[in-house]
Image (cartoon, rainbow, N blue to C red):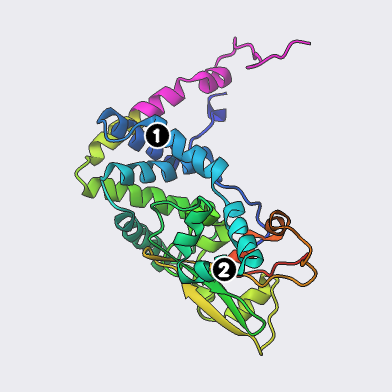
Amino acid sequence: MKNSKIERPWQAIRTEAVESLLVELGVIDSSRVDEIVQHYVEEVGPKGGARVVAKAWADPEFKKRLLNDGLAACAELGLGGPETEKLVVVENSATIHNVVVCTLCSCYPWPILGIPPAWYKSSAYRSRMVREPRRLLAEMGLVLPNSVEIRVWDSVSEIRYLVLPERPPGTEALTEEQLSEIVTRDSMIGVAKVVI
Amino acid sequence: MSINILAKPAVFPSPWTARAFAIVRAMEESGIFTGKDFQQELIFSIKARENAGTNIQGEAAYYDCWVEAMTNLIHSKGFSIEAIADHEKAIRFRFEHSHHEHGSGCPHHEPIPCFVEKS
């Protein structure tokens, strides 16, 4: 029966050991670690970004401010945090499609979109998006005609990007709240369009 | 290399990844290192793995790099690797003598529910 014991991954043990040591030394507090986990699990996520996009679609003055200074405009909606120094918002149109990548690691506008998806951090996405974006986007389900220019933005620690997707036709009667419900995380990274 | 965009979205794939993420944030808040310091270490860790021919394909590989970067960075900030190893040893000991091990190893163990909601 001994050989049926459950193994814990080394990363789990290392993480617990690091936390235990740092708490013992008074460097960090476990309750603060709990709060940070809870914040990212329950309070931060793509819904924040979706509110930003919906407001930009519904309010041209807000959109101007958003394109001028992303962080300041997001702060108007109570979104933001120390993780992002500068947020550049890039707008999609019928002829220009923007997509965001972090070629070196996983830079991402956390306070606006939450934690990045697994594929965003993968070697394949990080390396291929800057070499063959049209083909990769097509593989991911977004087929763009050759007439559309694709602009790939490489996130770094100082500058994070948010895509302002095109507002889909037929949404003229929707309220801002209803609009925010159709905006997806992937459309704000630029690997999908918003559809209804 | 293909991308699985349909992978189930989860904020963190496991409790330890959430902890590892938050510990780094807490250390940044404490001023032990900056977000940029950590990013550089994470880039180094990811690059080393990719240069060795291992692609980052899922959350597990990415968070391996995260934990590696966290360990290397706190070591470079003066925290002893031996102290971490001592804590790991204590954690392994506790885990091996925990309810799980006892339950699977003891022939007299009676399984009991951990929670009962009365009718």
Would residue B116 be counted in the magenta stretch?
yes
**Mark 1 → mark 2, Cα distance in angstroms:** 38 Å
Q: Residue at x 63, y 70 (%)?
A: A165
Q: Residue at x 77, y 66 (%)?
A: A171
Q: Is residue B59 above or below residue B47?
A: above
Q: Residue at x 45, y 61 (%)?
A: A71
Q: Which mark is residue A61?
A: 2
Q: Do tags 1 and 2 sit on the same chain?
A: yes
User: Tag 1, which chain?
Assistant: A
Residue A131, given in percent of the width and then of the height, sits at: 52, 81
Front residue of A63 and B77: A63
Q: Which mark is residue A153?
A: none
At mark 1, the secondary structure is helix
At mark 2, the secondary structure is helix
Residue B4 seen anywhere in this rendered image of the structure: no
Front residue of A178 and A37: A178
Pick out the residue farthest to the bottom. Answer: A147
Q: Which residue is mark 1?
A: A32
Tell me the quadrant of the picture where the C terminus of chain A can be found: bottom right
Would residue B115 be counted in the magenta stretch?
yes
Front residue of A64 and B104: A64
Front residue of B61 and A68: A68
- Residue A146 left/right relative to A115: right
Residue A161, given in percent of the width and then of the height, sits at: 49, 67
Q: Is residue A2 above or below residue A95?
A: above
**Would you identify the image quadrant in which residue A180 lies?**
bottom right
